[in-house]
Amino acid sequence: MGAPQASAAEQRNFPALLLQQLSAIKSAALNDDFAYREVTHLTENIGPRPSGSVQAHAAAEYVAAELRQIGLDVRLQPVTVPHWVRGAETAALVEYPGMVPGTTQKIVLTALGGSSSTPAEGLTGDVVVVNTFDELTALGRDKVTGKIVLFNELFDKQKAAAGMSFAAYGEAVRYRGAGAKAAADSGAVACLVRSVGNADYRLPHTGFSYPAGIPAGAVTAEDADLMAHLAAEGKVRMHLTLTPQKFPDETGYNVIADLKGSEHPEEIVVVSGHLDSWDLGTGAIDDGAGVVVAMETAEILQRLHLRPARTLRVIAWMDEETGGSGSKAYTAEFASDFAHHVAAIESDAGAAHPLGFDVKISPAAIEALRPVQSVLLSIGATVLQPSTYPPGADIAAMSDAGVPAFGIMQDGRTYFNYHHTAADTLDKIVPSELRENAAAMAVMAYALANMKDPLPR
Ligand SMILES: [Zn+2]
C-alpha cells in the first residue's frame, strides 16, 4: 500500500514548497544550539527569575535585546506583578512519641509562594495530619484551632511513571493551592503540604498558594511520611520558622516580538513560554526552555530567510507562576484582536523529548494538520492530543476565546522530580531533546503561519 493520497484541501494548504520549507526548518532546528545557548544565559548568567525580582527584569531586557538582534519588532508590555521574597525556612519536631530527651528531628521544607510569615523566632504548635479537605472538615474547628495542619496528599508516582504525570500533578496540587485557606478557615496557625512531586531525594517543591494570612510551606515527601507515622502514634509538636516578606507590587514585563507576515500581517500566530521562574532553582525546565524554543522559531526563520505569511509573534510571558498577571495584561490589551489570532502555542511542560502537542482545536483543524504530522514523524512529535482544558496557562484566555491552542507535549515522566525545586537547573536539559522541541515548535508555527487557509476554528 502506498502513502495516502493528499486531499485537495491538503494540496491547497500545504503545497510542495511549503512542505520543503517545513523540512528545512526541522533540519535547521536539529542542528542549531541557539536555544541551548539562550537558556544557558537565562539560567546560569541571570539565574532565578521570580516575579518582581531584578533578575526577572534583566531577563525581559535580555530576551528583548536578543530578539531585536534577530530583527524582530520588539516591545516590553508593562505588567503589575507581586513581589514576594523568601526568608528563613526551618522546622523541627520538638515533641513526638519515643523522642530521645534533649533531641529534635529536623524537617526539610520550603515556604510556598505568597506565604505569610511566622514571628522571627518562629511558632510552636501541635501537628494535625489529614489526607484530604474532607478529613479536615470532619475534624471540626475545635481539633484544628491553634495547630499546624499537614495535608498529606500523595503524588501518584505510578501515574507519572506511566506517562500521566500531569494528571498526578493536577490531583495533588489542589492542596498546595487551596490548603492554606482551608486550614486558616478551620483556625490553624500554619499549613504544610506534602511536596507535589515524584522524586525521592528529600527535596521540597515550592509553588503558588492562595494567600490565606497564615504561614504555608511544603515539606518533603519523606518528612510528610515521618510526621504521619509519628502522629499515628501520639502527639507531635513542631517548631516552625518561615519569614518570607511581601513587598509592594512591581512593574514587570511581557516581551512581545513580531516577525511581520508578508501576506496577512494582521493575522497572528503566537509562540511562547514564560520567563518568570521560582526562586529555588534557576528555572531551566520551568520555563526557560519554553522561552528559548519560542525565540528559536524566529531565529530559524530569519536565518533561513523564510518570511511567514502571517505574523509570527514571540511572547515571553511574565508572572505565570504567581498569578498570571502577564497573561491578564496581554488579554486586556489584545482581547478585541483575538479573532485575528490564528493560533497560539506555549511550551511549559519541560524540555524533554516532544511527543507532539496537547491541542484545544476543532476536529477539522486536527485533520487539516495531517501534513505537519508527517514532517514531524522522524522526531516522533506526531501526537495531536485533544484536550478539554487550555494546553498552557498563559494562552488559556486566548483558548477560552476560541483561539486554536497548542501546548508542546513533552515526555513528562521525570518533570515532577525537579519541578519547582532547587534542582531545576541547566543540567536537566538534554541539548538534543531541546533541539527536538525547537523543531516541533518552529515547524508547527510556520505551518500555522503559512498554510493557505487559516486553521479552522
Ligand atoms: Zn511553568
Image (tube, rainbow, N blue to C red):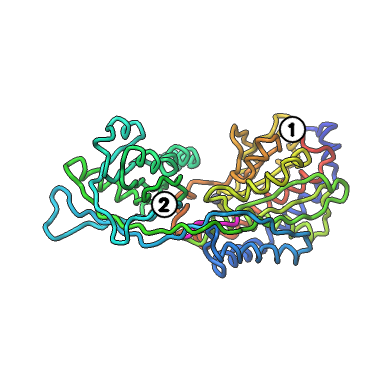
* Residue 193 percent coordinates (x, y): 36, 45
Q: Which residue is mark 1?
A: 457
Q: Residue furthest front?
A: 248
In the visual, does 257 lie left or right of 318? right
- Check disc 2: other Cα within 10 Å, few if <14, some if 14-19, many if 20+: many
* Secondary structure beneath label 2: loop
* Residue 167 percent coordinates (x, y): 48, 38
Residue 245, placed above or below residue 168 = below
Residue 264, placed above or below residue 242 = above
In the visual, does 53 lie left or right of 368? left
In the visual, does 159 lie left or right of 41? left
* Residue 319 percent coordinates (x, y): 57, 53
Residue 97, placed above or below residue 364 = below
Question: Which amino acid, by three-letter code, is at mark 1?
Answer: Arg
Query: Is residue 174 visible from the viewing direction of this image?
Result: yes
Q: Quadrant of the C terminus?
A: top right
Residue 327 belongs to magenta span: no
- Measuring 75% from the left and 67% from the top, which residue is drawn there? 69
- Magenta-colored span: 275-279
Q: Which residue is mark 2?
A: 115
Q: Residue furthest bottom?
A: 45
* Residue 149 percent coordinates (x, y): 30, 43
- Measuring 57% from the left and 56% from the top, which residue is drawn there? 276
